[in-house]
Image (tube, rainbow, N blue to C red):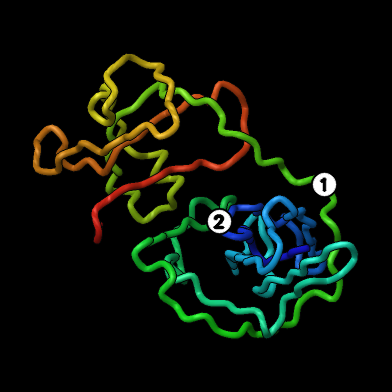
Amino acid sequence: HISADSQYALWVNGQFADFGQYADYPEFKVFDEIDITAFVTEGTNELLILAYYQGTDTSTYRKGPAGVIFDVTSGGQTLAVSGTQTRSRVASGFRNGPMELVSGQLGYSFEYNAAEDGKNEWLASVPVNGPAKLYPRPVPKLRIGGRAPASVVAQGFFMLHPAYREQTTAVKMQRAFLSAASLSEISEQNCAAPYVLAEGHPLRCAADSLSPVHAGENGIYIVIDLGAEESGCFELDLEAAAGT
């Protein structure tokens, strides 16, 4: 069982298990019941929780006290429970503090630096005053399924409008200038749209800031068609030189 303010993601023995706090209220705090049987082995097991605290009201979140509470049970027996003996640390790979809003509905964006990940020291957790009662999730969680098929239907380069640089991410995206390009300019593939995007297919930002052709461009954009209405996570594998 687990509950967090504001969000959590869970790994067991290095394997991703689940994520997603129910959109609740401080006075109606909801917990999730997650079956981790498939991830555990006989003997010592490791439970890792990445928690995120928003701390600012939006249309989809109401501010409560930061914290995570959990327990692990088997056959009616409690095997582990959160407390001062639980080790915790600030996730150094993520930027902490004020961040740019995606929008007033979606909350904050985030910044992540893999080179800084794991640098903070593990410390004893600090107890906080949490809710007096936790409630079971009123609706089932979304099921994590396989990857959805995807096709690239348009691509090119974008340039941010200078008049909107201080606006939210959503406004900057809506106001950006888009310049169409062939797929070969941003990928190792050279074909017409739509192009089925295979798992592991490499894309690259081929814009040369010193070239008059790409002067002032800020990056690449890709329009992907999933073929149906889907809800899920967008996954990217990024490779770059050290210090990038």
Q: Name the residue under label 1.
A: 139
Q: Mark 2 points at which residue?
A: 107
Amino acid type of the residue tagged 2 in the rendering: Gly
Left or right: where does residue 177 sit relative to residue 209? Answer: right
Rendering coords of residue 183 (x, y %)? 29, 24
Left or right: where does residue 73 sit relative to residue 194? Answer: right
Left or right: where does residue 223 sit relative to residue 230? Answer: left
Which quadrant of the structure image shows residue 178?
Answer: top left
Secondary structure at numbered mark 2? strand
First in sequence, mark 1 or 2: give its number: 2
Residue farthest to the right, as pictured: 76
Rendering coords of residue 136 (x, y %)? 85, 58
Q: In this view, does 19 lie above or below 235?
A: below
Which quadrant of the structure image shows residue 23?
Answer: bottom right
Residues at discs 1 and 2 in contact (Cβ within 8 Å)? no
Report, in whole angstroms, how far the alpha carbon at label 1 lies from the one at label 2.
23 Å
Which quadrant of the structure image shows residue 228?
Answer: top right
Q: Which residue is drawn at 50% across and 75% down?
A: 90
Amino acid type of the residue tagged 1 in the rendering: Val
Quarter holding the C terminus is bottom left
Which is in the foreground here, disc 1 or disc 2?
1
Residue farthest to the front, as pictured: 42
Rendering coords of residue 230 (x, y %)? 62, 31
Quarter holding the N terminus is bottom right
Q: In this view, does 216 lie above or below 198?
A: below
Residue count near mark 2 (Cα–Cα under 10 Å), binned few <14, some 14–19, many ≥20: some
Q: Residue at x 37, y 68 (%)?
A: 116
Q: How many labels does the image show?
A: 2
Q: Which residue is drawn at 79% across and 57% down?
A: 33
Secondary structure at numbered mark 1? loop
